[in-house]
């Protein structure tokens, strides 16, 4: 009997302990559920601080900054395919355009080249489009008009930018006149000029963009008033003048962004080819010395089908002949186009310079422009 009574006492104690632990266990389970509902999962216990931390982390991740004017960066981590399509502005205030100039100026000073695009009111404008906006703004300001600028889209890059060293000072009357010339050219041909004739010589396209932007930077600092003069010191060998930034917006072909290499000054004109295929190069220039293009890879070596810029020496490594390479496109064989030797008929990929054979292919020599 005494043994049975002892068993009963132990059972009653165990039941009482279980009943007292039930609320604590329930709270622990609730803590796990509330934490796993957020993005960060924290090991649960009965400490309330864990729940607070998890919720705070979720709020931080969901917080985003409001859009501002930005300059296109070569190493941008933005994924355009995941962002909402921004409506194309039909008009922009002069103040918005002038405001964007400081970003362009900072980008050039840091990277020694123009950005690929300029973001205004959330929309990415190509540099030729931005050139139009700048020249139109200067034209309106020169007439003392504060009206908005009607946007012009899909302006092409110049075919062959070239020019001289530009060092000196332009008066307000002079740079306003050059700006008007640029505006008239952009409006008439829907393309940017290769250069602008000035009192200091031929001002190359990239230098002209930089000059217009510098005028806008001065306007931003002086309550949107045109500066009395404009000082420039840009040699034709400046890194900025070696690359023409090219950007396709969301309404253009493939939504691609890349640079086109500016042909060097080698004393002779380049032949520009017209593409026939939808897979063909965007830009092809060649002469007896250089082969330059922005095209898709036709040999598969790059591992993608995006556009790439490349430049090679006009020399066939197979027959060892100089100046015999030319652009060739056969839609049945190579819709991407290829460099073909007119002497031995060897052909090479426009992007990698690889010969179109499977065994022991030769490669075109890369040109360091």
Image (cartoon, grey):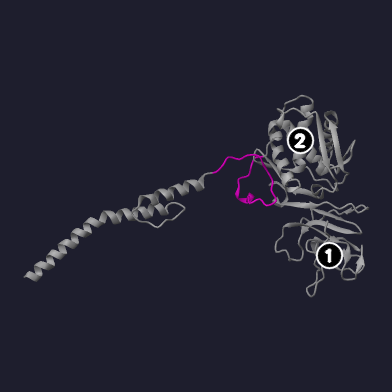
Secondary element at image label 1: loop
Of residues 245 and 107, which is closer to you in this image? Answer: 107
Quarter of the image containing the C terminus? bottom right
- Residue 84 located within the stretch drawn in magenta: yes
* Residue 193 at x, y percent in the picture: 84, 42
Residue at the extreme top of the image, as rendered: 144
- For residue 58, above or below residue 229: below
Q: How far apart are marks 2 and 1 (CA)?
A: 40 Å
- Residue 356 located within the stretch drawn in magenta: no
Q: Which mark is residue 134?
A: 2
Q: Is residue 305 left or right of residue 204?
A: left
Please tell me which residue is depicted at 66% across the width and 50% down the height of the picture: 76
- For residue 337, above or below residue 116: below
Q: Residue 365 carries which label?
A: 1
- For residue 356, above or below residue 113: below
The image quadrant of residue 327 is bottom right
Please tell me which residue is depicted at 83% across the width and 33% down the height of the picture: 175
Main secondary structure along the magenta-highlighted residues: loop
* Residue 179 at x, y percent in the picture: 82, 34
**Which badge, 2 or 1, comes first in the chain's sequence?**
2
Q: Which mark is residue 31?
A: none
Q: In this view, does 41 lie to the left or right of 192?
A: left
Other-residue count near label 1 (Cα within 10 Å), few / some / many at <14 / 14–19 / ≥20? some
Q: In this view, does 56 lie to the left or right of 195?
A: left
Of residues 11 and 50, which is closer to you in this image? Answer: 50
Residue at the extreme left of the image, as rendered: 1
The image quadrant of residue 284 is bottom right
Q: Give the range drawn in magenta.
A: 64-87
């Amino acid at each position: 009997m005494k043994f049975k009574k002892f068993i009963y006492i132990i059972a009653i104690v165990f039941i009482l302990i279980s009943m007292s632990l039930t609320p604590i266990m329930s709270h622990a389970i609730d803590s796990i559920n509330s934490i796993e509902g957020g993005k960060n999962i924290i090991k649960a216990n009965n400490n309330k601080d864990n729940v607070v931390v998890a919720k705070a982390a979720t709020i931080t991740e969901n917080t985003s900054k409001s859009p501002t004017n930005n300059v296109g960066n070569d190493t941008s981590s933005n994924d355009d395919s995941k962002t909402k399509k921004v409506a194309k502005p039909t008009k922009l205030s002069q103040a918005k355009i002038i405001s964007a100039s400081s970003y362009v100026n900072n980008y050039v000073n840091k990277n020694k080249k123009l950005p690929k695009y300029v973001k205004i009111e959330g929309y990415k404008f190509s540099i030729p489009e931005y050139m139009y906006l700048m020249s139109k703004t200067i034209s309106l300001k020169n007439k003392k008009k504060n009206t908005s600028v009607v946007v012009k889209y899909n302006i092409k890059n110049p075919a062959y930018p070239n020019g001289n060293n530009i060092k000196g000072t332009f008066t307000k009357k002079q740079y306003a006149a050059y700006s008007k010339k640029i505006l008239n050219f952009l409006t008439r041909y829907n393309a940017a000029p290769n250069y602008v004739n000035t009192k200091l010589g031929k001002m190359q396209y990239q230098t002209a963009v930089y000059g217009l932007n510098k005028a806008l930077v001065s306007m931003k600092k002086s309550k949107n008033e045109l500066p009395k003069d404009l000082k420039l010191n840009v040699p034709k060998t400046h890194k900025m003048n070696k690359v023409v930034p090219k950007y396709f917006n969301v309404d253009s072909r493939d939504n691609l962004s890349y640079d086109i290499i500016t042909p060097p000054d080698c004393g002779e004109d380049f032949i520009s080819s017209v593409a026939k295929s939808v897979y063909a190069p965007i830009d092809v220039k060649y002469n007896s010395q250089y082969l330059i293009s922005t095209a898709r890879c036709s040999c598969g070596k790059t591992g993608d089908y995006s556009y790439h810029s490349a430049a090679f020496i006009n020399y066939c490594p197979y027959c060892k002949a100089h100046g015999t390479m030319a652009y060739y496109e056969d839609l049945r064989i190579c819709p991407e186009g290829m460099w073909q030797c007119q002497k031995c008929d060897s052909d090479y990929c426009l992007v990698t310079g690889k010969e179109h054979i499977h065994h022991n292919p030769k490669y075109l020599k890369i040109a360091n422009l």
